[in-house]
Image (spheres, helix red, strand yellow):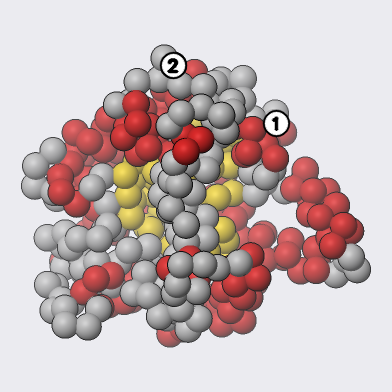
């Protein structure tokens, strides 16, 4: 779980930055720090946009700079290219192999494989700028080489088709976290919509098979991602897991009462078990409205730090999967 430790430095970095007197000094301090310490972003949905816009065809995809290329330049969903990643000094990016809920019990396993294939081909196409990594050591090595460490996270537990064998094969293909649910329940875990008014939980957390999924992920070395799950599922997973868990793109429920965010009692348990919340930039999770600011994001980071502690804060912007 050294990968999680690599992310946990963010809170300490923020403290050093804030000690600088002026905005220019703080920005310069941040850049100095990020030259030494890799900044890891927990969630980016670019691969799904490539599927939507290009049907996963990469031959004409100019990833270096998409700012003037149709349809990317006109899409509210498009935020990511190599130029902007360099400008933001992002050292490591988890690319999401997202599987929509509409595929559950149908072709979800195939879609997961196709999206992992896409991520691997994208990285190989830009081998001078990107490299696929599966370990914390790989992130550190890529940072020294000035290449973007590219990692794979599978979003949606239905991607495993209720099969531990499929889970193991996703790990062999490079997946290093699995989001236990998306916006739909799986047969073994409740999603966050189960916490919304008028909704009835299907399971009440994790089933026995869901707990076996968590334990098998522990055995493999795949991180358990609790973004999108219900609060009972969060608590059951943290109690079951023998390794720290992550929230790859969630924020603080106390500041925005979205069911996608993490309540304080779960943050306290997260601190006890060594996990991390990677704060999302989506306004509906930050200000519970259509607009939010960097100050609002900072407030969520500070709240997670206040409740869980400085070692349990990360960033999971959610770029290319948000339209605001």
Whether residue 266 sits left or right of residue 316 in the image: it is: left
Q: How far apart are marks 2 and 1 (CA)?
A: 25 Å
Q: Which of the two discs, 2 and 1, labels the residue nearer the N terminus?
A: 2
Disc 2 on helix, strand or loop? loop
138 and 234: which is toward the camera: 234
Classify 10 Å Cα crowding around label 1: few (below 14), some (14-19), many (20 and above): some
The residue lying at 26 percent from left, 32 percent from top is 113
Tell me: 319 left or right of 65.
left
Whole-percent x, y for residue 57 in the image = 35, 20
Q: Can residue 273 be seen in this view?
A: no
Q: Is 193 left, or right, of 72 in this rendering?
A: left
Q: Name the residue under label 1.
A: 146
Left or right: where does residue 187 sit relative to residue 294?
Answer: left
Element under disc 1? loop
Residue at 61% x, 75% y: name it. Answer: 299
In the depicted structure, whether residue 299 falls above or below residue 150: below
**Residue at left 35%, top 39%?**
48
The residue located at (56%, 20%) in the rendering is: 127
Residue 298 locus on image (x, y percent): 64, 70
Residue 209, image quadrant: bottom left
> Would you call the spot at circle 2 few (<14 residues within 10 Å), some (14-19), or many (20 or more)?
few
Q: Check the image and report above or below for 306 versus 213.
A: below
Depicted 20 relative to depicted 252: above or below = above
Residue extending furthest toward the top? 59
| Residue hosting label 2 | 60
Pinpoint residue 240: horizontal percent, then vertical percent. Answer: 31, 69
Camera-near label (2 vs 1) is 2
């Amino acid at each position: 779980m050294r990968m999680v430790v690599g992310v946990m430095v963010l809170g300490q970095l923020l403290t050093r930055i804030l000690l600088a007197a002026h905005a220019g000094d703080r920005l310069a301090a941040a850049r100095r720090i990020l030259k030494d310490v890799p900044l890891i972003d927990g969630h980016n949905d670019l691969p799904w946009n490539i599927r939507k816009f290009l049907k996963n065809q990469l031959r004409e995809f100019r990833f270096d700079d998409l700012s003037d290329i149709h349809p990317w330049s006109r899409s509210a969903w498009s935020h990511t290219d190599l130029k902007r990643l360099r400008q933001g000094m992002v050292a490591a990016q988890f690319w999401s192999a997202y599987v929509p809920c509409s595929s559950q019990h149908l072709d979800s396993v195939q879609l997961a494989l196709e999206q992992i294939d896409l991520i691997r081909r994208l990285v190989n196409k830009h081998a001078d700028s990107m490299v696929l990594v599966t370990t914390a050591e790989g992130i550190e090595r890529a940072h020294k080489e000035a290449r973007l460490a590219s990692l794979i996270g599978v979003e949606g537990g239905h991607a495993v088709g209720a099969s531990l064998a499929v889970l193991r094969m996703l790990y062999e293909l490079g997946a290093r976290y699995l989001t236990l649910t998306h916006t739909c329940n799986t047969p073994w875990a409740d999603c966050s919509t189960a916490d919304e008014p008028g909704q009835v939980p299907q399971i009440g957390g994790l089933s026995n098979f869901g707990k076996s999924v968590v334990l098998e992920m522990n055995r493999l070395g795949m991180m358990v991602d609790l973004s999108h799950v219900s609060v009972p599922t969060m608590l059951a997973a943290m109690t079951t897991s023998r390794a720290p868990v992550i929230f790859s793109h969630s924020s603080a429920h106390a500041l925005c009462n979205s069911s996608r965010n993490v309540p304080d009692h779960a943050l306290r348990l997260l601190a006890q078990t060594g996990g991390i919340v990677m704060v999302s930039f989506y306004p509906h999770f930050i200000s519970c409205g259509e607009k939010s600011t960097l100050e609002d994001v900072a407030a969520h980071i500070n709240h997670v730090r206040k409740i869980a502690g400085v070692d349990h804060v990360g960033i999971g912007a959610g770029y290319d999967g948000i339209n605001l």
